[in-house]
Image (spheres, grey):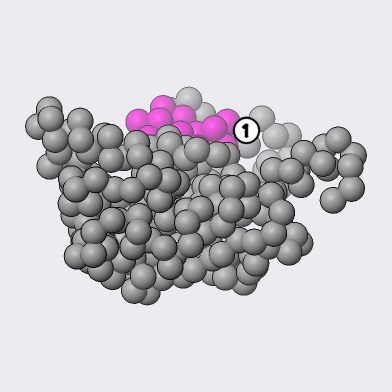
């Protein structure tokens, strides 16, 4: 077997996963018992797995998600209005491809950010480009970009991102320029890309957050059409988590 030339060729073709699997196979004493088809299938599966992992790591790095959250770790037992079937449907990512929105509301500590980040991580696993922002930081970044001339480039980058997560929506009323910027971003995404908002403020009060009737109608029209609403209720999940760590009853 021409082991080294084969390895060199695999690396030249940028098949690093296959190269590593090939080296492992040649070190197995009973590898000859496998057929050529079986060995080739194992090599291809390894290459596919490693490529998917590299893609996930790259997308996760770009997403800058606030929490290391996972769908598998969500607590569906606590009585807080979290529908398992809906979350699992959202985890498929089809709503993102269909240009829909997810609106997550609830009190402080109810798990809004965790759910948002869990869906963000799942989107990255599905190969979907994702970006997480606290709304205030996004608005600050847009203001800075407007000042240094990079605003069009930033807006285009946001428009190309398949899933945009905006956390802490409604902590402060929007200013005039912020309303304009937010409407432009949402208009670019409407029915084209997925948007997730997490907020302590009930949806019925979002007009007050926008602070202007005309912009309020326009922004909410783009958010509420084709929206999946999740309203988290009950006790703070942070207190619940702390009590389980200290041995207190739930």
Q: Spot the residue most to the bottom.
A: 226
Counting other residues with Cα less than 10 Å from the Cα at mark 1, is it few (<14), some (14-19), or many (20 or more)? few
Question: Residue at 57% of width from left, 31% of height from top?
Answer: 23
Residues shaded magenta: 6-24
Q: How many marks?
A: 1
Residue 76 appears in the rendering: no
Location of residue 249 with respect to 149 vertically, above or below:
below
Q: Nearer the viewer, residue 76 or 109?
A: 109
Q: Nearer the viewer, residue 120 or 211?
A: 211
Location of residue 114 with respect to 223 vertically, above or below:
above
* Percent coordinates x, y for residue 44 in the rendering: 50, 49
Question: Residue at 46% of width from left, 70% of height from top?
Answer: 228
Q: Spot the residue most to the left.
A: 149
Is 14 part of what is drawn in magenta? yes
Quarter of the picture containing the N terminus is top right
- For disc 1, the marked residue is 24
Indicate left or right for 177 with 128 as reference. left
Location of residue 203 with respect to 61 vertically, above or below:
below
Q: Please, what secondary structure does the residue beneath circle 1 have?
A: helix
Quarter of the image where one finds residue 177: top left
Question: Residue at 54% of width from left, 65% of height from top?
Answer: 230
* Percent coordinates x, y for residue 201 in the rendering: 47, 56
Q: Nearer the viewer, residue 86 or 17?
A: 86
Indicate left or right for 178 with 44 as reference. left
* Percent coordinates x, y for residue 55 in the rendering: 43, 42
Quarter of the image where one finds residue 63: top left
Is 112 part of what is drawn in magenta? no
* Percent coordinates x, y for residue 225 in the rendering: 34, 74
Instruction: Determine the main secondary structure of the stretch shown in magenta.
Output: helix
Residue 168 appears in the rendering: yes
């Amino acid at each position: 077997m021409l082991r080294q030339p084969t390895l060199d060729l695999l690396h030249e073709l940028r098949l690093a996963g296959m190269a590593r699997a090939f080296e492992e196979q040649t070190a197995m004493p009973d590898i000859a018992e496998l057929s050529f088809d079986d060995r080739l299938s194992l090599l291809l599966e390894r290459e596919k797995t490693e490529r998917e992992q590299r893609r996930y790591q790259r997308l996760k790095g770009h997403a800058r998600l606030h929490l290391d959250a996972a769908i598998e770790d969500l607590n569906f037992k606590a009585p807080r209005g979290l529908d398992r079937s809906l979350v699992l449907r959202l985890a498929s990512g089809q709503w993102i491809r269909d240009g829909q929105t997810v609106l997550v509301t609830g009190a402080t500590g109810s798990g809004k950010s965790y759910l948002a980040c869990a869906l963000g991580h799942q989107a990255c696993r599905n190969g979907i480009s994702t970006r997480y922002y606290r709304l205030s930081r996004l608005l600050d970044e847009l203001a800075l970009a407007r000042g240094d001339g990079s605003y069009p480039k930033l807006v285009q980058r946001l428009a190309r991102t398949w899933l945009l997560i905006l956390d802490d929506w409604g902590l402060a009323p929007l200013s005039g320029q912020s309303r304009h910027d937010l409407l432009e971003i949402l208009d670019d995404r409407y029915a084209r890309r997925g948007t997730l908002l997490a907020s302590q403020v009930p949806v019925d009060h979002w007009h007050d957050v926008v602070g202007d009737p005309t912009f309020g109608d326009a922004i909410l029209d783009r958010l509420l059409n084709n929206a999946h609403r999740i309203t988290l209720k009950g006790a703070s999940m942070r207190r619940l988590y702390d009590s389980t760590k200290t041995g207190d009853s739930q």
